[in-house]
Image (tube, rainbow, N blue to C red):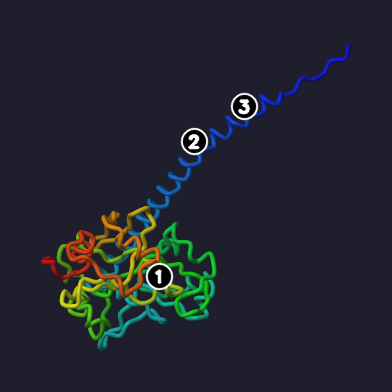
Amino acid sequence: MIKTKKGFTLIELLVVIAIIALLLAILIPGLKKAKEVAASVVCLSNQKQLGLAFTLFAQDNDNEIVDAEPTIDGFILDGSKRISAFVAAPTPIEAETLEGKIEALRRGGLWQYLDSHGVFNCPFDRRWKKQSTFADGTTALGGYRSYSMGAVLARGVRTWNTSTWENKYVITKYTQFISPSQKFVFLEETDREQYYNRNVWDMSINENAGFHWFDPMAVVHKTSSTFAYADGHADKYKWTDKQMIEMSQGIMPIKKRLSDPSSDDYKTIRRAYVPGRSDF
């Protein structure tokens, strides 16, 4: 008698496929969540390293803080003093490649305190992986640096940004911080209008001109953003209204970025933004 090798029946195969599909349905969301948590941890670590680099620079430079405004050569002239910008701005040629963008980071004042260019990039920020078309119609490689500094930490702002009143609150020395643990020095920004986070981050603190957000922050950790503070620690902030989330998604034009003066988000960020005042 010839013996035949018994295989799976159609029903058995369908059962196996159903079990595999069920397992994947259970595991994939968990893996996605784990990946999101890991990326958030990396981003917070990046912010902490940037915050510590900020404090070390001040310690090594007679309390002078690194400047917030990126320039091509990586320096700011403040009278007769030559002060390092925290990063350099990429030249148009450098901006065309990731290697060029990284080279601009190396010209900045904080590079000496950091161990990798990866510190400047949040894992959720993937702009640099593709060509993008920007507000001015140009096409270029998307931005790589995920973190910016505010205008109140840029010496040049003392002669401009008068409409926002940021020029009134610029500081240049670490000792001018009031409650450093409550004042942020780095924030997440993924500029959708330029091929990198150009210049400084702005918000209006001029009550006469209305409560106004100018530049959006990046909200990529669900409904939260990360910050580095002047004492070197880092933390996440969860947005309580949808305005900043809408701005980060590019669906709210600048002219409509007026904030409700009673907004907890606006009041919290303004209080943490102005470095030399505690009465906001």
Q: CA distance from mark 2 to mark 1?
A: 36 Å
State the residue position of label 1: 191
Q: Which mark is residue 15?
A: 3
**Residue matched to label 2:** 26
- Relative to the observer, which residue lies in front, 60 or 188? 188
Q: CA distance from mark 3 to mark 2?
A: 17 Å
In the foreground, 234 or 110? 234
Q: Name the secondary structure under disc 3.
A: helix
Q: Secondary structure at mark 2?
A: helix
Q: Quadrant of residue 276?
A: bottom left
Mark 1 vs mark 3, foreground winner is 3
Q: Quadrant of residue 271?
A: bottom left
Q: Quadrant of the N terminus?
A: top right
Residue 250 spot, x, y in % from top left: 40, 67
Residue 76 image position (x, y, % from top left): 32, 82
Q: In this rendering, would 99 be left or right of 215?
A: right
Q: Residue furthest left?
A: 279
Left or right: where 260 falls relative to 33: left
**Real-space CA distance between mark 1 and mark 3, rounded to the nearest whole angstrom:** 49 Å
Q: Is residue 172 left or right of residue 2?
A: left
Mark 2 Cα within 10 Å, few/some/many (few <14, many 20+)? few
The answer to whether one can see residue 181 in this image is no
Q: Which label's residue is closer to the chain start, 3 or 2?
A: 3
Q: Is residue 270 above or below residue 172?
A: above
Residue 136 to residue 274: above or below: below
> Could you tell me residue 257's position as x and y percent?
29, 70
User: As shown in the figure, which amino acid type bears the numbered disc 1?
Assistant: Asp
Task: Locate the C terminus by quadrant.
Answer: bottom left
Amino acid type at mark 3: Val
Q: Earlier in the sequence, mark 1 or mark 3?
A: 3
Residue at the location (33% across, 67% down)?
Answer: 216
Secondary structure under the numbered disc 1 in the rendered image: loop
